[in-house]
Image: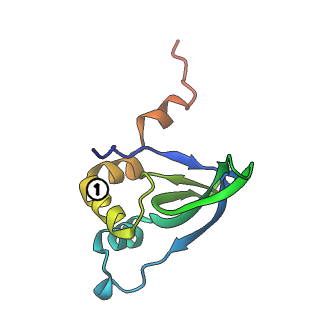
């Protein structure tokens, strides 16, 4: 069962590497949903390689590659993932089709967790 989108900080210290996947041509895109979200709503698709601890070598080693739908906070220069990590762009495309309304709601209106962190005004 797929989980609904949640905004999570992508910690750069947990990564060996990352790159942004760019979708250039709408007519030739194999992933129209991802193309639309990236071009029209300023989402990004990131390919991540996270660090995991190996009990055999007792050090951090690279994990398998994963794809996430992400947003960049330009003020703080942080990336936030909105989707779980998927093994392929096709799986990410399917996830975005399923949760398109939730993703756009989080991006355009905000999520409930971010509202709780705002200072509350006092009324007298």
Residue 1 placement (x, y as % from top left): 27, 44
Q: Nearer the viewer, residue 25 or 15?
A: 15
Residue drawn at point x = 46 percent, y = 66 percent: 45
Residue drawn at point x = 32 percent, y = 82 percent: 29
Q: For numbered disc 1, what is the local secondary structure?
A: helix
74 shown above or below 27? above
Quarter holding residue 34: bottom left
Quarter holding residue 122: top right
Left/right placement of residue 10 relative to residue 91 reads right
Residue 79 placement (x, y as % from top left): 58, 56
Q: Nearer the viewer, residue 119 or 9?
A: 9
Tally the marks. Answer: 1
Quarter holding residue 30: bottom left
Left/right placement of residue 115 relative to residue 27 reads right
Q: Nearer the viewer, residue 23 or 104?
A: 23
Q: Nearer the viewer, residue 95 or 64?
A: 64
123 shown above or below 76? above
Task: State how the image is colored.
Answer: rainbow
Residue at numbered disc 1: 100
Would you call the spot at circle 1 few (<14 residues within 10 Å), some (14-19), or many (20 or more)?
Answer: some
- Direction right: furthest residue: 58
Residue drawn at point x = 67 percent, y = 55 percent: 12
22 shown above or below 52? below
Residue 49 placement (x, y as % from top left): 59, 62
Residue drawn at point x = 30 percent, y = 46 percent: 2
106 shown above or below 96? above
């Amino acid at each position: 069962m797929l989980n609904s989108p949640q905004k999570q900080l992508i910690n750069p210290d947990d990564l060996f590497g990352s790159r942004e996947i760019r979708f250039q041509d709408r007519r030739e895109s194999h992933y129209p949903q991802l193309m639309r979200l990236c071009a029209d709503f300023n989402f990004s698709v990131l390919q991540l390689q996270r660090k995991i601890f190996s009990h055999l070598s007792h050090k951090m080693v690279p994990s398998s590659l994963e794809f996430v739908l992400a947003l960049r906070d330009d003020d703080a220069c942080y990336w936030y993932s909105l989707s779980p990590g998927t093994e392929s762009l096709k799986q990410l495309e399917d996830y975005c089709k399923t949760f398109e309304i939730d993703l756009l709601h989080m991006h355009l209106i905000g999520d409930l967790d971010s509202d709780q962190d705002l200072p509350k005004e006092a009324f007298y």
